[in-house]
Amino acid sequence: MNTFSSAASRPVSIAALGECMLELQGQAFGALRQSFGGDTLNTAVYLSRCGGPGLRVHYATALGDDSLSTGLLERWAAEGLQTGLVQRLAGRLPGLYLIELDEGGERRFHYWRGQAAARSYFDGAATALEEQADALDALYLSGISLAILPPAGRERALALMTRMRAAGKLVAFDNNYRPRLWDSVADARYWYQRAFAAATVALITADDHQALQGLSDLDAAVTAAQALPVAEIAIKRGALPARVGLNHVWQDVLTETVARVVDTTAAGDSFAAGYLSQRLHGAGPAESAAFGNRLAARVIQHPGALIPREAMQDLMGS
Ligand code: ADP
């Protein structure tokens, strides 16, 4: 594999592929606050913040041609993301979810994403992502990125992974698993197996691996994850040390001590961003995981997926 040194004369570039949805938050029939979110988008934003000017982060997805889609694009650009790989599909809309807060402050998630434009990213002729892949250094996608695509779209995504991997690029697959997005667990296992085979880096949430593989406990999930056919693997286990392996050499990397966890949304997404931002700048797996742990620990001490930039100034790339 290439090394992605920060001494390179041009910035290192990565594309994150997936879906970002509109977010509404509030009580049913009460006032609703608008925002946006999605696993790969969260990772892209944190990659952009941590990678600094030496890292160009593209977000690849499909949106509609409506004003909400335009609003999303503007907000992504304000976060420093490159939006040239985004497709605008006439008459389509972004997906939507509502975080319903009940009287006790408990959160319930409701999704309207079945018709979302992002599902159609690969429906047409070659996308900008496929056309420009040779100029990229890295690709990042998750199990959710694959789940929302129709089978033909999944084939295109896997073909892209395979092609970029063959060209010596970093291809990271994050195992975020949402059972409801899949027809069956067997279907999910089939596509995950192919995605792991096409990846150079696997980012594994042990809980999700346990659920996908139907394993009895977390230790079994960690053992199974260590046997995945991927050269580089980072396994996340909440507050327990992250376990990282490169070519079968494994290291446990302690997480930060967090006295009060406020909201664990995007813990894994931010870990992925922290990890990859450092790997792409040439750091080793343990050092990169330590940075991922630091960023994730910061993120879970604030509400929401995307914490204020001011709360992570010391972790931003310069
Ligand atoms: P996911 O969000 O994918 O479910 P995890 O819950 O395993 O992922 O957490 C991802 C990362 O967030 C961990 O590897 C760790 O760095 C950090 N993290 C999560 N929970 C804690 C915690 N209680 N204390 C410190 N760090 C944590």
Image (cartoon, rainbow, N blue to C red):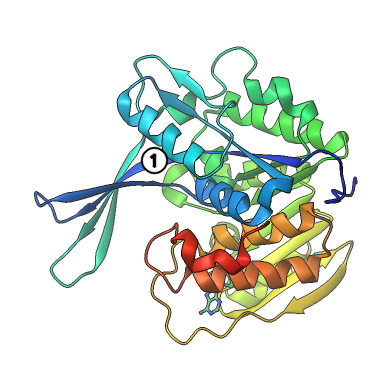
- Image coordinates of residue 226 in percent, x first then y, are 76, 66
The residue that label 1 is drawn on is 21
Q: Quadrant of ligand 1?
A: bottom right
Residue nearest the viewer, comparing 147 with 58: 58
- Image coordinates of residue 314 in percent, x first then y, are 60, 68
- Amino acid tagged 1: Met
- Image coordinates of residue 86 in percent, x first then y, are 53, 27
Q: Disc 1, ligand 1: is the CB inside 8 Å?
A: no
Query: Is 37 above or below relative to 102?
Result: above
Left or right? Give the position of 12 relative to 316: right
Residue for point 74% across, 59% down: 278
Q: How crowded is mark 1: few (under 14 residues within 10 Å), some or many (20 or more)?
A: many
* SS at badge 1: strand
Residue nearest the viewer, comparing 118 with 32: 32
Q: In which quadrant will I find the C terminus? A: bottom right
Query: Is 204 above or below relative to 256?
Result: above
Left or right? Give the position of 25 relative to 275: left
Residue for point 43% across, 17% down: 89
- Image coordinates of residue 71 in percent, x first then y, are 36, 33
Residue for point 53% across, 25% down: 121
Q: Is residue 249 visible?
A: yes
